[in-house]
Image (cartoon, rainbow, N blue to C red):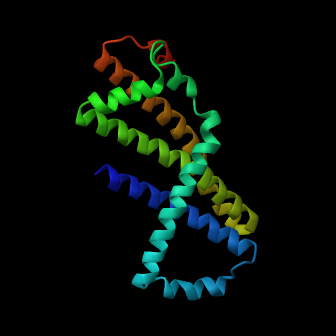
């Protein structure tokens, strides 16, 4: 189940990556609209769908890594690093994953999926917005939609990231019986 979830995440991230790549390709005149129209007929074949799926997956892997690197600076690392004064985060994470219940692991993994999707959404929807604004006219007006999703992704990522570490901290506290820094999550 977890593997399927990660594959679907990467496919979604990669799909939105393909969108901004196509938009920039058209805008930079690397591909014209006529070529795209001809491609749409070809893309309906099974081999083309398999290629697009594979490309989407690979772009999802790259974009997930890139978005992690780009957002790491803003990643609220104090939540991760200050869960416990006595244990490093890696030890906390290993304890929760090894000794936690299946439901606890599933909940934390689900929350991490939200973190990854919103984090990649920040970059993908920002690039889609920039590409759409570069066209001007109606396309620039329509760019308000991905701009709004970009802003929601920022807010969602910040909340999901903090919530992920809150769940990890409380799971660690339950498993170890050791105190955690509750003041971190009371803000």
Residue 123: horizontal and vertical position, in percent? 62, 51
- At a point 47% along the width and 63% down the height, the residue shown is 57
Number of marks in the rendered image: 0
Q: Is residue 184 left or right of residue 170?
A: right
Image position, residue 132 (x, y; %): 68, 64
**In the shown orientation, is residue 32 left or right of residue 68?**
right
Q: Is residue 31 above or below residue 139?
A: below
Along the line of sight, the residue nearer the viewer: 19 or 2: 2
Q: Is residue 57 left or right of residue 66?
A: left
**Is 7 rendered above or below residue 178?**
below
Q: Residue 177 sits in which quadrant?
A: top left
Could you say where residue 22 lies in the image, as x and y percent from the top left?
Answer: 63, 71
Residue 3 vs residue 36, the one in the foreground:
3
* Location of residue 60 in the rendering, given as x and y in whole percent from the top left corner: 51, 58
Identified at 44% across, 77% down, the residue is 49
Q: Residue placed at 57% from the left, 29% from the top? A: 76
Q: Residue at x 48, y 49 (%)?
A: 117
Q: Is residue 79 at least partly visible in the picture? A: yes
Tell me, yes or no, if residue 136 can be seen here.
Answer: no
Give the quarter of the image for residue 114.
Answer: top left
Q: Is residue 187 above or below residue 18?
A: above
In the rendered structure, the answer to whether residue 43 lies left or right of residue 167 reads right
């Amino acid at each position: 189940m977890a593997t399927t979830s990660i594959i679907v995440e990467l496919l979604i991230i990669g799909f939105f990556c393909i969108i901004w790549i196509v938009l920039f390709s058209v805008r930079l005149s690397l591909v014209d609209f006529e070529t795209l129209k001809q491609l749409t007929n070809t893309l309906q074949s099974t081999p083309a769908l398999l290629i697009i799926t594979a490309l989407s997956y690979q772009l999802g892997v790259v974009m997930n890594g890139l978005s992690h690197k780009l957002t790491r600076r803003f990643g609220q690392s104090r939540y991760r690093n200050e869960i416990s004064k006595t244990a490093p985060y890696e030890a906390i994470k290993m304890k929760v994953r090894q000794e936690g219940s299946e439901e606890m692991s599933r909940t934390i993994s689900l929350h991490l999926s939200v973190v990854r999707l919103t984090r990649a959404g920040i970059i993908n929807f920002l690039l889609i917005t920039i590409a759409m604004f570069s066209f001007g006219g109606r396309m620039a007006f329509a760019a308000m939609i991905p701009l709004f999703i970009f802003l929601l992704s920022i807010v969602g990522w910040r909340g999901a990231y903090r919530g992920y570490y809150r769940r990890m901290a409380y799971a660690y506290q339950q498993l170890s019986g050791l105190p955690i820094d509750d003041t971190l999550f009371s803000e």
